[in-house]
Amino acid sequence: MLADKKIVFSGVQPSGNLTIGNYLGAIKNFSRFSEDFKTFYCVVDLHAITVRQVPAELRRRTYETLALYMACGLDEKKNTLFVQSHVPAHAELGWILDCYTMFGELSRMTQFKDKSAKNAQNINAGLFTYPSLMAADILLYQTDLVPVGIDQKQHLELARDVAMRFNQVYGDTFTVPEGYISTDTMKIMSLAEPLSKMSKSDSNQNAVVYILDSKDDVLRKFKKAVTDSEACVRYSEDKPGVSNLMTIYRAFTGKTFEEIEREFDGKGYGDFKMAVGEACADGLAPVRDEFARLMADKAHLETVMKAGADEAAYYARKTMSKVRRKIGFVN
């Protein structure tokens, strides 16, 4: 029951192939919460349309993202898996929270500035108020814990501020969520520019390893990965390319940085990059196989979507009933 367990919520956009950064930094770790928490994992298609989408591609990617959730270990019997637009309360609460979020708060969001620079021809209102909808996603389920990356901390802080502001005006309405940043995985960086985060929207395809890449593509990309001229496998801030590869190798093998340094002592970067590529490709193989199986059975995916949306809507209605009553809407 909801009262017995704390709530975890997270969402992933269906806006492109997911990378090993999404996998190692987020989705792979989600399953650990399902035993001790009530978990809601959402395909956030409403967020995706802040950037122009090709409708057929958005539909396809929505199925694919749900299938990837499941292929990465999220059991639909233990987790509520659903599509954001299938629960209209997300949009309703998003608008209400727009009215309790300050213009200055939204204008300080670094992701708005970054996305505006990348989409100069389409700086729309949704791009600006995106964090209010994210706050609604979280607060709708009385979420206690939100697994976030470093780049989403600012949005979570805004959700906390909005929840506390609403609670101060209307009394206890929303749970004020806490962020959870995993300590055992680090941010995965670009293979071409290791000072930048690996991004699924990167125009340089050699910089990004996707979860669904073939083994040949994975190996080819790691062969091209940027290192340095020292020819020494050592974890250090002044060796961002090598350190990034070590982080990926550690994530797929479970070895410590010290063990990795010993393993490749006296060996060249060619051997090291090949080993990282092999470990990554082998680690992703079961995910790719399960993904293919799930995508061949869209009827099952639609059953999961429907069941997840029904359960999510049940909890959303409880929150929205309270919110509507407190702000003065007539039932």
Image (spheres, rainbow, N blue to C red):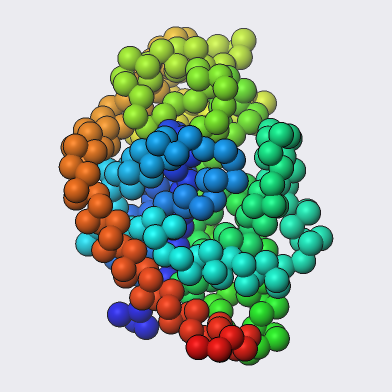
* Residue nearer the viewer, 112 or 218: 112
Residue 98 x/y as whole percent: 67, 67
Figure quadrant of residue 262: top left
Residue 300 shown left or right of residue 279 in the figure: left
Please count the marks in the image. 0
Residue 140 shown left or right of residue 111 in the figure: left
* Residue nearer the viewer, 178 or 51: 51
* Residue at 34% across, 64% down: 309
The answer to whether one can see residue 232 in this image is: no
Residue 224 x/y as whole percent: 49, 12
Quadrant (top left, top right, bottom left, bottom right) of the N terminus: bottom left
* Residue at 68% across, 35% down: 119
* Residue at 33% across, 47% down: 66
Residue 179 x/y as whole percent: 55, 62
Look at the picture and state if 26 lies above or below 238.
below
Look at the picture and state if 101 lies above or below 166.
above
Residue 276 shown left or right of residue 156 in the figure: left
Residue 25 x/y as whole percent: 47, 44
The answer to whether one can see residue 187 in this image is: yes
Residue 179 shown left or right of residue 295 in the figure: right
Figure quadrant of residue 251: top left
| Residue, far right | 104
Look at the picture and state if 213 lies above or below 35.
above
* Residue nearer the viewer, 18 or 14: 14
* Residue at 50% across, 20% down: 205
